[in-house]
Image (cartoon, helix red, strand yellow):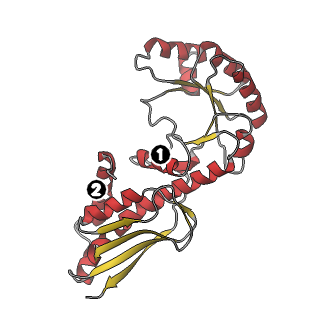
């Protein structure tokens, strides 16, 4: 699998940050010709993501390393299962270990949390999506991890969708004024979403015409009413629930009939999946 240039640059930056002038512990304790086999093993149940990024970290340190991805992105693992196998120079494996694990653990954490949310709404028709609340520089990797966990991506950045939120509405003079201003300038053909908090705002968004309506910080009861209002429209815009929705509260929102539920916690609060590297020196 070929990684995009920005992912490769991020891997190189992570290695430069960690290795600096040299991994002197490995250089001074491990013989130059010592070979080893290392296995990355799951210590907790979860979903793997970032496997190719971790593999590339090993290869960037030493292209002669043999890296076998055993659990590809999207694979559910249990404690004790081997995720990746690396063979070659013991020094090289040890030098790359932390950078590779940092990527693999963080991204697998995102995929694991996403899978829990996806499982929680299974059968409702609602899709779990991410937000822009990502680690700086890691957005594309974290969004790929959301997909590995069974979720879907919202817009990537400010440039690929118009999302008119409360502050835009306040600054432009209202939903109608904001949407009309976008329509007059939208020579890129970007899809338009508007945030609403009341049924009157939902009706205003419908009247002016948008592609998606976000229901922000509504109760499930109010959101169900909002969904019914939108269903009467032709063409019907997509609907999205947002605002502090947790794993414990998501199901009532999914049952309102919304198309999407955006959850910032998929990326900004996902704990790293517990993985470890176990190395065995090869006699010789």
Which residue sits at x=44%, y=35%? 157
Q: Residue furthest right?
A: 221
What is the quadrant of the C terminus in the image?
bottom left
x and y percentages locating residue 68 in the rendered image:
37, 66
Residue 83: x %, y % from top left: 46, 67
How many numbered discs?
A: 2
- Viewer-proximal residue among 31 and 38: 38
- Residue depicted at x 23% and y 83%: 31
Q: Which residue is mark 2?
A: 12
State which quadrant residue 126 falls in: top right
Determine which quarter of the picture holds residue 280: bottom left
Would you say the residues marked 2 and 1 are in contact, meaning their CB atoms lie under 8 Å apart? no
Quarter of image, res 250: top right
- In the displayed structure, does residue 167 sit left or right of residue 89? right
Q: Give the number of the mark in front: 2 or 1.
A: 1
Residue 128 at x, y = what percent? 60, 43
Marks 2 and 1 sit apart, C-alpha to C-alpha, by 20 Å
Nearest the eye: 196 or 46: 46
The 10 Å Cα crowd at callout 2, few under 14, some 14 to 19, many 20 or more, is: some
Q: Secondary structure at mark 1?
A: helix
Q: Earlier in the sequence, mark 2 or mark 1?
A: 2
Q: Secondary structure beneath disc 2?
A: helix
Residue identifier under label 1: 143
Q: Is 262 above or below relative to 41?
A: above
Residue 281, placed above or below residue 56: below
């Amino acid at each position: 699998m070929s990684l995009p240039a920005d992912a490769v640059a991020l891997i190189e930056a992570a290695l430069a940050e960690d290795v600096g002038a040299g991994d002197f512990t490995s250089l001074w304790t491990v013989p130059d010709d010592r070979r080893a086999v290392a296995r990355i093993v799951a210590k907790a149940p979860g979903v793997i993501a970032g496997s190719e990024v971790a593999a590339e970290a090993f290869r960037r340190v030493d292209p002669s390393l043999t890296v076998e991805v055993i659990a590809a992105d999207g694979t559910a693992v249990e404690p004790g299962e081997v995720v990746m196998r690396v063979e070659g120079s013991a020094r090289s494996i040890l030098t790359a270990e932390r950078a590779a694990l940092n990527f693999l653990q963080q991204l697998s954490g995102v995929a694991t949390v996403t899978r829990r949310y996806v499982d929680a709404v299974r059968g409702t028709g609602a899709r779990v999506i991410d937000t822009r609340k990502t680690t700086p520089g890691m957005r594309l990797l974290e969004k790929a991890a959301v997909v590995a966990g069974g979720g879907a991506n919202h817009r990537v950045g400010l440039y690929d969708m118009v999302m008119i939120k409360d502050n835009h509405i306040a600054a432009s003079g209202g939903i109608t004024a904001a949407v009309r201003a976008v329509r007059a300038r939208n020579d890129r053909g970007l899809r338009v979403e508007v945030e609403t908090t009341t049924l009157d705002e939902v009706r205003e968004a419908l009247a002016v015409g948008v592609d998606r309506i976000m229901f922000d910080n509504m109760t499930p009861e109010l959101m169900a009413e909002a969904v019914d209002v939108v269903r009467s429209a032709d063409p019907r815009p997509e609907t999205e629930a947002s605002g502090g929705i947790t794993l414990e509260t998501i199901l009532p929102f999914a049952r309102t009939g919304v198309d999407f539920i955006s959850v910032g916690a998929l990326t900004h609060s996902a704990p790293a999946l517990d993985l470890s590297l176990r190395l065995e020196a090869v006699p010789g």
